[in-house]
């Protein structure tokens, strides 16, 4: 990866990226409300489980398949996996989250003219664009390799979860950095697992996370909330 690609990846991974990620906790706030998470140790354990059981086994492999779709100009495959991921979001909050963030990232990519005009027309033609679809498009359009792009996607998710923990548990800044420092070390292994799952025929994707779906459903009617999910 050259310096231009690195800086593009840093821009795409920046917390300042205006796609609204800071407003979602993906069930973390509901876990705090039910006291499943209440300190640094339980926050770290919760985020680790989501990384290993949800991100590595479902979201990241789908991201890899979408990246391959953009790289190979496989429009049918792109449409399939974009729709598949949207259908796998089990609650209204989860669907709205991926729709809003995906649309915001597509708008950013369009305004900044990332990628070829013909390819931008392809993503704009999708009826609903999920976040993994939009992110994989941006990574490919910016000339970033698949593994680095996936690592950035996972790290951005991890950083957002840590920020949610700091605000809701609440935790101190150093507690958050300890969690981030500990869990980021596992990202290379998570990427390897996700790529292996995506390369399998058929892809080995697991979506069973009933507690997360229940927490997301409860969060929709939670009395007091900081986050939209």
Image: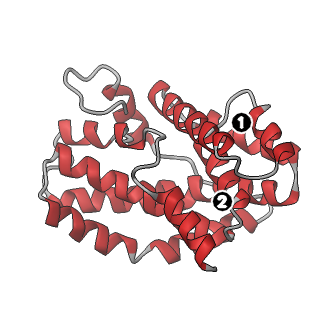
Q: Residue 213: x and y, percent?
A: 43, 36
Residue in the picture at 49% in, 24% down: 92
The residue closer to the viewer here, 193 or 166, is 166
Residue 150 lies in what quarter of the image? Answer: bottom right
Q: Residue 13: x and y, percent?
A: 48, 59
From the viewer's perspective, tell me whether residue 49 is left or right of residue 126: left
Quadrant the C terminus occupies:
top left
Mark 1 residue crowding within 10 angstroms, few (<14) / some (14–19) / many (20+): some
Can you identify the residue that label 1 sits on? 83
Residue 126 lies in what quarter of the image? Answer: top right
Of badges 2 and 1, the one in the foreground is: 2
Can you identify the residue that label 2 sits on? 139
Query: Element at badge 2?
Result: helix
Quadrant the N terminus occupies:
bottom right
Query: Element at badge 1?
Result: helix
From the viewer's perspective, tell me whether residue 228 is left or right of residue 179: right
Mark 2 and mark 1: Cα distance apart in space: 20 Å
Q: Residue 70: x and y, percent?
A: 79, 54
Residue 117 lies in what quarter of the image? Answer: top right
Residue in the picture at 13% in, 48% down: 170
């Amino acid at each position: 990866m050259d310096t231009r690609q690195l800086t593009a990846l840093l821009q795409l991974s920046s917390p300042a990226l205006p796609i609204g990620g800071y407003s979602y906790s993906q069930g973390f706030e509901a876990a705090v409300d039910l006291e499943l998470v209440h300190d640094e140790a339980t926050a770290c354990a919760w985020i680790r489980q989501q990384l290993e059981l949800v991100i590595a086994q479902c979201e990241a492999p789908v991201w890899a398949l979408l990246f391959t779709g953009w790289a190979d100009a496989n429009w049918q495959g792109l449409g399939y996996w974009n729709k598949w991921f949207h259908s796998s979001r089990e609650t209204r909050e989860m669907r709205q989250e991926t729709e809003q963030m995906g649309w915001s990232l597509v708008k950013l990519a369009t305004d900044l003219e990332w990628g070829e005009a013909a390819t931008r027309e392809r993503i704009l033609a999708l009826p609903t664009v999920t976040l993994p679809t939009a992110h994989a498009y941006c990574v490919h359009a910016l000339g970033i390799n698949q593994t680095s792009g996936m690592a950035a996607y996972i790290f951005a998710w991890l950083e957002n979860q840590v920020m949610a923990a700091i605000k809701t548990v609440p935790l101190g800044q150093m507690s958050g950095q300890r969690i981030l420092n500990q869990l980021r070390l596992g990202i290379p292994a998570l990427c390897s697992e996700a790529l292996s799952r995506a390369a399998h025929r058929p892809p080995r994707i697991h979506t069973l996370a009933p507690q997360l779906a229940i927490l997301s459903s409860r969060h929709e009617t939670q009395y007091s909330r900081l986050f939209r999910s």
